[in-house]
Amino acid sequence: MNQATMKVEGMIFDLDGTLIDSMPAWENIGSDFLKKHGIAPPDDLNEIIKIMSFAESARYFIEFYGVAMTEKQVGDEINGMIRENYAKHIALKPFVKEALDQYLNQGIKMAILTATHKTLTELVLRRFGLLDHFEFILTSGMTGLPKSQPEIYHQAVAQLKLPAQQIAIFEDSLHCIKAARASGCQIAGVFDEASKNDWEEIKKIADCTIMSFKELLS
């Protein structure tokens, strides 16, 4: 995909794995927590806890690994670690700032649609000087909807106040791309290492795909 193919007036961006390289931080948070408490995590820890809720994973650390904390204390500490990652460590994916600056200068209306908490989203975007590039931030927490549900995309489109066919949605994960298809928008698949096993399927479903935001620079 290149600049010539993007004849749109609006863009809706996922955050994690699309604009920022945050997936490793999320995948390693459980291991990082255990290491912080002097416990060697198993290699398959992420596979074990990824199907658990936040409260269930906190209980698992306490009961299985003997972490001497309450569930609330575990949750608070992990939330603090996540916040620190967004505030200090997580990087933009290459050429994201250049692409977003370009679209802002072209007058394209942009928005964020993410499963990440709004506070964390604002934190990382502000750090890179990008927060004011966006008309709004819409999150799963704000809507009560997961990004696997098409309705959350309909809400984002309605809030951007443009015809769906004039909007491009950028996503890195297969289940989100499937849900976004129902919006009537153009769908751009963005490569991320965390979803590389789905890349061939993403290329079939999305209207276009990019390996890097460098492809969008004019």
Image (cartoon, rainbow, N blue to C red):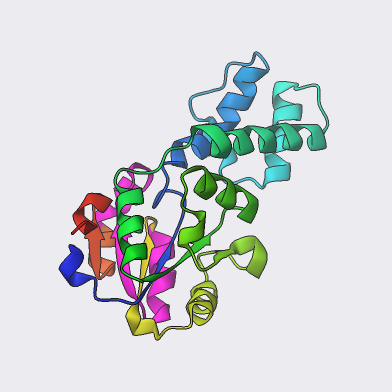
Q: Which of the pair 151/61 is nearer the observer?
A: 151
Q: Position of residue 139 (x, y in %)?
A: 59, 62
- Residue shown at the point (28%, 68%) measured from the top left: 205
Q: Residue at x 54, y 67 (%)?
A: 136
Q: Is residue 5 visible?
A: yes
Which residue is at 71% across, 26% downward? Answer: 64
Q: Residue furthest front?
A: 105
| Residue 177 drawn at (x, y percent) | 38, 65
Pick whichever, 50 or 36, lies toward us: 36
Residue 59 visible in the picture: no
Please name whichever residue, 52 or 139, is drawn nearer the observer in this view of the structure. 139
The relative height of residue 150 versus residue 38 in the rendered view (above or below) is below
Which image quadrant: the C terminus? bottom left
Is residue 183 shown in magenta? Answer: yes
Q: Is residue 85 above or below residue 161?
A: above
Q: Nearer the viewer, residue 80 or 125?
A: 125
Q: Main secondary structure of the magenta part?
A: helix
Marker count (numbered): 0
- Find the residue positioned furthest to the bottom: 163
Task: Decide if residue 8 is on the left or right side of residue 183.
Answer: left
Q: Quadrant of residue 69?
A: top right
Q: Position of residue 169 (x, y in %)?
A: 38, 68
The image quarter in which residue 140 lies: bottom right
Was residue 185 drawn as part of the magenta stretch in this picture? yes
Q: Quadrant of the N terminus?
A: bottom left
The magenta segment is 174-200
Picture coordinates of residue 30 (x, y %)?
59, 31
Q: Is residue 56 left or right of residue 92?
A: right
Q: Residue at x 61, y 37 (%)?
A: 82
